[in-house]
Amino acid sequence: MSSYKSLQVLLTSTILHALSAAAASSTAPTAALQSCAAGLNGQLPVPTPPDFEFSGNVRRYYVAAEEVEWDYAPTGWDNWLGVPMNVSPRADMAGANQYGTKWLKALYRGYTDSSFSTYSEQPAWQGTQGPTIRSEVGDLIEIMFVNNLSQNYATMHSMGLEYGKVNGEGADYPNNTMPGANVVLPESGAVPPVPQSGVGPGGCVVYKWMVNSAAGPNVGEPGRVHSYHSYVALQQDSNAGLIGPQIVYAQGQMNSTMANYREFPLLYMIYDESDSWLSAQNKAALGGSSHSKRNAQGGQGNRQGQNQGNNNNGHPQNGYQRPNEGSSSSSSSSSSNSTPTGTYGSPSASTVSASSSPSGSGSSGSTTGSFNIGNTNNLWSGNYTVWHPQIVNLAGSSQFSGAPSFHTMNGYIFGNNPVYEMCLSDNVIWYVNAYGSASHVFHMHGNGFTYNGFKNYAISVNDGVGKTLYMNATGAGKWQVICHVNNHQTKGMVSDYQVYFAGQCPLPALGS
Ligand SMILES: *[C@@H]1O[C@H](CO)[C@@H](O)[C@H](O)[C@H]1NC(C)=O
Ligand SMILES: *[C@@H]1O[C@H](CO)[C@@H](O)[C@H](O)[C@H]1NC(C)=O
Ligand SMILES: *[C@@H]1O[C@H](CO)[C@@H](O)[C@H](O)[C@H]1NC(C)=O
Ligand SMILES: *[C@@H]1O[C@H](CO)[C@@H](O)[C@H](O)[C@H]1NC(C)=O
Ligand SMILES: *[C@@H]1O[C@H](CO)[C@@H](O)[C@H](O)[C@H]1NC(C)=O
């Protein structure tokens, strides 16, 4: 079918683009990065919303979307039952042992500056979550975002802050909200306009988010959680892993809060690996299928050759050959410098099931649905910038129907998180977010917490919702913090936190 052919061409050119971007970026900063960095100009979006009063502070962040081999259980143990994963009946029941716990994911990773050469520091327990975007009420946030994925589109969409259409929303849809929907629009009618639409592989954009007072914490509280995520194909982007935390502080209180509280961004997320847009690559690597068609596609051989000699750390049991793997248990920053390798195939058109749906309107929310990307003739070239990024992201999804869902907190299952640590009597803030397609219940043993000033022992968080929970660490010991939805907890949403006894705390004291 000619439509298959055209998709293949699209994907192949995407891959070649990524290859040249990767080759060019070996000496940083490239001209492309430099010109993108020029967007970090401190200028407020125009029009500036009337409820935003600029304090004069501009906060800059450098974030890339990267392909990372993530290990949901880096200790190799079910630390709830206290047994190795491969003999844990709970891990078996959760499907965590069938294909192993190492999966290719797309994660946000922070860098220190616009050269994108050094990772910013991030605690290992923050896991799959992207870098924490911190700000104070009145700030302008400027984020230089680089898409370093090999094939997929990605954006950063803020939950909770203000932005303009052009530089801030990180979402593509037609600008047909004026009277009479379905009006004929030119390509320039896509929102945001063409240059800012879904960021393709090798692409870069500067987002500007404004921290208005409505985004700030409750009176009497110093901080409040928000989040950000990719908004190309929301479900598939989230399952791939593109989610991160934001914290907004009251004006002038960021430093003092960071110094006087233990802060823990905590993400409840069930990653459905069957509906990540990396499912085709994961299936090829983990599913044992040979996918010979994949090798017929241009570019794959080059990707393999590019990384030879780099896989000394490989985990052959999974069929992965990736640099730096296995390091995610010790340090998040060293875990993520992954390079696409030949082990992964592209979601070639031959692996995509062509349904007969004429509208191409999606997989109806089903985790195993098929999407009609076979016939892009149904889609108009006039709004290519709107539909093309979604088509590309959907191409890799729903390709691995037997893949498990990992019930995680910060990307860890069955107590595999580096323990959340605090000293007795410390002030603690849990910045809790939930994503995915299920609601969750934060609950911890040993200590209570307050939400909006009221005492609680358990609290629900729905998809896309963030809640800021304050805790006084009065109960010493090693305790569980879990999802109290029964079938989530039993499938792995169990983490550990530690309140050290008086006189035994190895952490630097707060306030110092
Ligand atoms: C959306 O359409 C309206 C009406 O045509 C126009 O005024 C506005 O500038 C458009 N917005 C963008 C971001 O293109
Ligand atoms: C999409 O493109 C077609 C063809 O150019 C046009 O008729 C249609 O109005 C466009 N739709 C939107 C929402 O832009
Ligand atoms: C907050 O901390 C940062 C980093 O240590 C420092 O550069 C900045 O000057 C501090 N701000 C205030 C208001 O103390
Ligand atoms: C992107 O990935 C390539 C390797 O695939 C790497 O060389 C490059 O430094 C990365 N960073 C950026 C900003 O492109
Ligand atoms: C923590 O202790 C302080 C001082 O006793 C009290 O004001 C505050 O309400 C407590 N917070 C929580 C979350 O229990």
Image (spheres, rainbow, N blue to C red):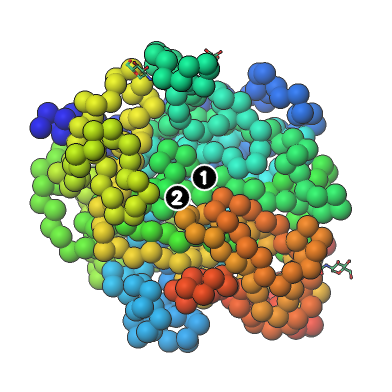
Which part of the image, by quadrant, shows the N terminus? top left
Check residue 238 in the rendering and tell me which mark sits there, or answer none. 2
Q: Secondary structure at mark 1?
A: strand
Q: Which residue is mark 1?
A: 229
Is the Cβ of the residue at disc 2 closer than 8 Å to that at disc 1?
A: yes
Quadrant including the C terminus = bottom right
Q: Is residue 139 above or below residue 264?
A: above
Q: Residues within 10 Å of mark 2 (few under 14, many from 20)?
A: many
Query: Left of 310 or right of it: where is 267?
Result: right
Q: Amino acid at mark 1?
A: His
Please provide percent x and percent y for residue 77: 43, 80
Quarter residue 9 falls in: top left
Residue at (47%, 87%) from the top-left corner?
A: 82
**Residue 282 in which image quadrant:** bottom left
SS category of the residue bearing label 2 = helix
Circle 1 crowding by C-alpha within 10 Å: few under 14, some 14–19, many from 20: many
